[in-house]
Image (cartoon, rainbow, N blue to C red):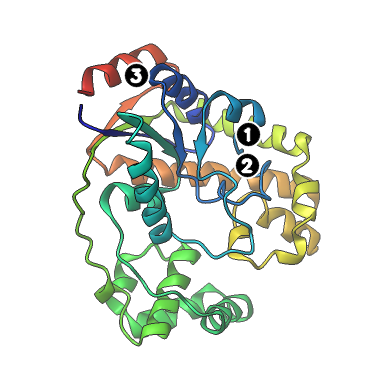
Amino acid sequence: MTKTLIVLVGPTGIGKTELCLNLAQHLNTEIISSDSRQIFKELKIGTAAPTPEQLSLVTHHMVATHSVNDYYNAYEFEQDVLKLLEKLFEKHDQVLMTGGSMMYIDAVCKGIDELPTIDAEVRQHVMDMHNNEGLEAVRRQLKMLDPVFYDQVDLKNHKRVMHALEVCLMTGKTYSSLRTNSARKRPFNILKIGLDMDRETLYNRINQRVDIMVNDGLFDEAKEFYHLKDNNALNTVGYKEIFAHWDGEYNADTAIELIKRNSRRYAKRQLSWFRRDKEINWFHPFQTNEIIKFVDNHID
């Protein structure tokens, strides 16, 4: 039987976890998380990590495997997951991967170019530039060093802009010249399933999930890591808004509203990214039986 990686994608808050659990139990297989923040063992509430009960139902991988003090990127994720899949395919014909981190998913499905490890001095230099002079200063230097990538990148995505500049400074080469953008052939089949629903319902689900996170202790969780607020792992929705509140930029209620707003915006970006992938087969998250039937019909 041909080995198949079933990839379940969708925006934050749409219900990927529950559906993936049902599908994994149906196939008697295991789940790989492709969430770039759930790998950090300290961040449970703000990343909506699987609960102990959910983890007990199905074996999960790439959850709580690293510390917030670790540097980790999509290339490392690709390499780790490919090695993991070799082992999992020895005992399963199908393996599930689910999450919403677009670059991590593409890294496993299509491959990602190996880029240099950025040393601490270069990373701190770019971070200081961003903190002291603003994102526009980082953009200006990137435009000077790599005008090709400057014209391609989402200039509002500070992480992508900063990382591209880090690579330029680290290597003395343009970031664009180090990217081949050529998909790599994998020794297994890939079946992609996407989840979507009407925007009003999705946004209401996101708002409700943020309220649940706050009630579950999100502020207390964030407080433990306030002293690490400049770490890349914590520069993410749900934590950065709370840190800004503690920095005196706005009150707690405003922080919560900003978490909701930024989560909705992230969901919109996720859907825009996934919609460009013509290999994704789209379903409503409540179509569990239809999705199971679809999977059964598309695996050898």
In the picture, measured across the screen, residue 154 lies left or right of residue 189, that is: right
Q: Residue at x 44, y 70 (%)?
A: 161
Disc 3 marks which residue? 291
Q: Is residue 117 left or right of residue 175?
A: right
Q: What type is the residue that disc 2 sits on?
A: Lys
Percent x, y of residue 157: 46, 62
Crowding at dot 2, Cα within 10 Å, few <14 / some 14-19 / many 20+, comes out as many
The residue tagged 2 is 260
Which numbered tag is attached to residue 62? none
Dot placed on the residue nearer the N-terminal end, 3 or 2: 2
Q: Is residue 198 above or below residue 228?
A: above
User: Where is residue 237 shown, x and y percent of the image?
Assistant: 60, 51
Above or below 62: residue 13: above
Per the rendering, the mark at residue 207 is: 1
Amino acid carrying mark 3 in the image: Ile
- The amino acid marked with disc number 1 is Asn
| Quadrant of the drawing holding the N terminus | top left
